[in-house]
Structure formats: C-alpha cells, structure tokens
Image: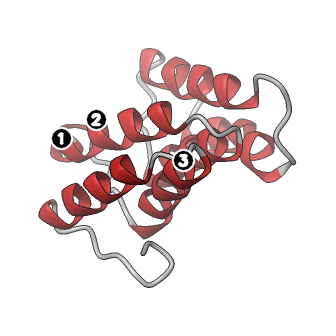
Amino acid sequence: RDSTSFGAALSPCYRRPPALGTWYRALLLLSNAVRAEVAASTSMCNATVSACEKGSYWREALRLLLQTLECNEAVGVEPNVIGCSAAISACQKGDEWQSGLWFLETAREHHVELNTISF
C-alpha cells in the first residue's frame, strides 16, 4: 500500500459522473490511507475534494481543504489551485456563495496561488 495505489483507487471517484456515495467512498479511501500511515499527497486530497464537489458536498470539500491548509507542514500536503477551485465550485453548486467567498479569502491568506478559474 502506497500513495500511488490509493491514488489509483481514488481516480474513479472524481472522474465519473457522480454516483451515489462516490464522495463518501473517496473520503473513506483517504481516511484509510492516513490510518495505514501512507503519506497523503496533494493529488490524493485534490481527488477527494473533486469527488465531494461532483457530489455537491461542499461542507466536506471545505472541511478537508481547511484541515490541509491548517496542517500542511505536518502532513506534507500543499493545497493548490486545483483543490481550492474544486472546493469553491462545490460551494457554488450548493448555493453557498458566502462560504465560497470566505474560503477564497482563507486560501489567499494561506498564500495558495489561485487563478481566474478559482474566481
């Protein structure tokens, strides 16, 4: 078990049209990777956030990225424009524009480089 294996298992969770429980499966896989002491990667976190975004689970997307922002040095995962844009998109899909704006500002405060897609 390594990050490549978990990454491969996460891939169907965000690439396919949203299926019932796909976002939950992605969160479970990421949680299992952490429990198995597999070093989480930015791509693993992005895939999980994207799965939450596709399922319109904005709270879970934000929660995961906020945890990553707060402890990125401890876990070695650097939040980037891909994950942040997916989280903001999840807020938009959930009609939670205030949360999206708040997260946008939080990401900027943590020096995450964003682009026009994020806005």
- Mark 1 in CB contact with mark 2 (< 8 angstroms): yes
- The residue lying toward the viewer, choosing from 62 and 30, is 62
Name above or below for residue 62 compared with residue 37. below
- Furthest toward the left, the residue is 109
What SS does tag 3 mark?
loop
Q: Going 48% across and 64% down the picture, which residue do you hit?
A: 85
Point out which mark residue 89 bears.
none
Q: Residues within 10 Å of mark 1 (few under 14, many from 20)?
A: few
Point out which mark residue 95 bears.
3
Lower position in the chain sequence, tag 3 or tag 1: 1
Q: Residues within 10 Å of mark 2 (few under 14, many from 20)?
A: few
Lower position in the chain sequence, tag 2 or tag 3: 2
The amino acid on which the numbered mark 1 sits, given as a three-letter code, is Glu
Q: CA distance from mark 2 to mark 3?
A: 22 Å
Image quarter for residue 28?
top right
Pinpoint residue 25: horizontal percent, then vertical percent: 69, 23
Image quarter for residue 108?
bottom left
Q: CA distance from mark 1 to mark 2?
A: 5 Å
Which mark lies nearer to you, 3 or 1? 3
What SS does tag 1 mark?
helix
The amino acid on which the numbered mark 3 sits, given as a three-letter code, is Asp
What SS does tag 2 mark?
helix
Point out which mark residue 70 bears.
1
* Lateral position of residue 43 relative to residue 62, left or right: right
Name above or below for residue 27 compared with residue 71. above
Q: CA distance from mark 3 to mark 1?
A: 25 Å
The amino acid on which the numbered mark 2 sits, given as a three-letter code, is Gln
Find disc 2 in the rendering and name its residue: 67
Q: Going 58% across and 34% down the picture, which residue do you hit?
A: 57
